[in-house]
Image: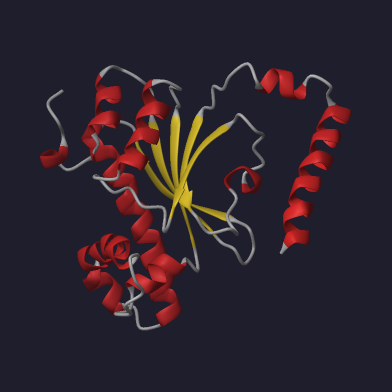
Amino acid sequence: MENLYNQLLQNNKDWVKSKLAQDPNYFNRLSLGQSPPILWIGCADSRVPANEIIGAKPGEVFVHRNIANMVVHSDMNMLSVLDYAVNVLKVKHIIVCGHYGCGGVQAAMTNKHIGLIDNWIRHIKDVYRFHQDELNEIKDEKDRFNRFVELNVVEQVLDLGKTSIVQTAWESGQEVHVHGWVYDIHDGIIKDLEINLKDNKSLSEVYQLDI
């Protein structure tokens, strides 16, 4: 364990050396501030590193991660990240990226009691309930799991559009697009679910706020 810990610190030193060898001003430029065009809301799964899988450099993606890439309307952590990204950083694209094989989504398909996380998983179960007719029609368990992952992303995209943060930005004329993606760990390819919200007319009327 100690060897691993020390290796992490050494890896950092080696990384700094390699960056400075390529560009002596690399860290000086980074220290001046950030203006990323993208907010990434992804899963906390260690196999889905946001910057790496889209080839982005430090400073290009503002990242929020949690179990199963959820957008929960009472989650102050997520809302704070969203507010800062939209109103301060002025991001132009918000991407919700799920992934096939997601443990959180898989747990929501069962009745297993895990612990504290059960309270978080319940929000994912709500997504299953919304789409249970479609999902229950899928006989192959793997196919049903994959479709559940996709539908969960779609619902989180819609939940972002329902926030007053995003709708206020739209109302003010700010360009903010909300997208849904799913990453396949088996081959590294991202699937675009082709959902793109750009104004509150993309939402059901009941969610359109009078701002």
Q: Position of residue 81 (x, y in %)?
A: 40, 35
> Would residue 202 be found to the left or right of residue 91 on screen?
left
Asked whether 28 or 131 is in front, the reply is 28
From the viewer's perspective, tell me whether residue 102 is left or right of residue 164. right
Pick the quarter of the image with the C terminus: top left
Q: Residue at x 77, y 53 (%)?
A: 6
Judged from this view, the residue extending furthest toward the right is 21
Number of marks in picture: 0
Answer above or below: position of 81 versus 172.
below
Residue at 45% x, 33% y is 93
Which residue is at a point 33% across and 75% down the rendered structure image?
Answer: 109
State the image quarter where residue 171 is shown: top left
Percent across and percent down for residue 69 are: 41, 53
Pick the residue in front: 133 or 42.
42
Question: How far across and how far down the image is residue 54, in percent?
Answer: 62, 44
Please identify the quarter of the rendering in which residue 68 is found: bottom left
36 up-or-down from 104: above or below: above
- Decide if residue 194 is on the left or right side of residue 123: right
Where is residue 162 shown, x and y percent of the image? Answer: 23, 39
Q: Quadrant of the N terminus?
A: bottom right
